[in-house]
Image (tube, rainbow, N blue to C red):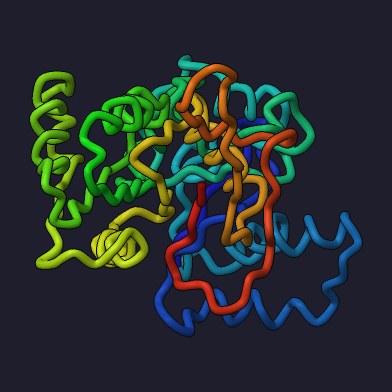
Amino acid sequence: CTLGEEGKGKSAMGLCNGVILAARNATFLQMWYDKYHSFSNDKKKWNYHSVTLPQELAKAHPELLSVQPFDAFHWPLWDAPGIKLMLNSFDYEYSNNKAVHIWKHGVERTPQKDFNLAWCFECHSTLVSMLRSYVPDPLFSVVIPCMKQGPTMEDALRSVFTQKIPNWEVIIVDDQSPDHCGTAAHTWAEQHLDKRQLPRLRVLVSDRVVGEAEARNLGLKEAKGVWVISLSAGVSLGPDLFHHATVEMSRHPTVQLFYSDEASPSGGPAHTIPDLNDATASAVASIGGLPQKATAAD
């Protein structure tokens, strides 16, 4: 069984239960569990059972436990300086860390309490930048059916390509359009997208004219993102929609649908889905019958 120290030097508090590496039914864990008959939610007793007790058992039975140093699992610490070092600093490199305990309750007591998924793309700290590699990619799948809408596609595509959150894919479904709008959109993208971004755009062509709804369904079946955005060819996304949607995902992890209506600027036919925020969006926490993929709908 393996545990790590919580705190260092004279400020060490014991062995933290935040990370436990052990074989099934390890003797040390069984001894530890047996002591929980006196456990309660009293803060002092909780700390005793979680941190002090395993240290006492380790001293009595050193042959049953491997103790890792403070910076193996539980550094930075849960106090305000530790949370700042973790979420708002580049002064620690994590070179000795085998894991990182993010200390949810500690974060909630600090100025970093608004920490969310979108921070992974904003370079707040060493750790947050490292977390970016764990964000699903694509995070958003944008599905755009098209029929005789080649000229209107550019603004819609540009509104996706310029989002601050880069973990997206675009699926254009060409519904046997006479103007080959899917091919035209891909050609435009080749001229305006970085070569590394171009694979994020896919064009599907229906084998017959199926209509906008069914064409959209074809795209949904191919979507790989965690979230799906249903976008019409003549509609653009607000410049920060992905960012705000990502923040809301973090705040409301059980939500299955985010909704943001269209806004039409005066004097023009263009429509834009505004940035997702409290003024323009409502979140529905429980919607029966939705597929596993969640949807940010237009």
Q: Specify the quadrant of the image occupied by residue 132.
A: top left
- Identity of the residue furthest to the right in this view: 42
Task: Name the foreground residue: 39 vs 229.
Answer: 229
Q: Residue at point 53% right, 35% down?
A: 273
- Residue placed most toward the observer, 29 or 19: 19
Left or right: 72, with 244 as reference point: left
Query: Residue sitting at 35 percent across and 32 percent down?
Result: 156
The one of 45 and 198 positioned closer to us in this rendering: 198
Seen in the picture, residue 61 relative to 149 is either above or below; the reply is below
Please name whichever residue, 15 or 61, is drawn nearer the observer in this view of the structure. Answer: 15
Q: In which quarter of the image is the N terminus?
A: bottom left
Residue 111, horizontal then vertical, whole percent: 74, 24
Q: Residue at (51%, 51%) from the top-left corner?
A: 297
Provide residue 144's location: percent of width, then percent of height: 31, 47
Res 181 seen here: yes
Task: Confirm whether residue 119 shows in the render.
Answer: no
In the rendered image of this protein, does residue 223 appear above or below residue 33? above
138 vs 30, left or right, is: left
Left or right position of 247 against 11:
left
> What percent of the width, then of the height, locates residue 142?
35, 46
Q: How many marks?
A: 0
Height in image: 94 above or below 256? above
Q: Where is residue 295 in the image (x, y as percent from the top left)?
A: 48, 56
Residue 261, quarter of the rendered image? top right
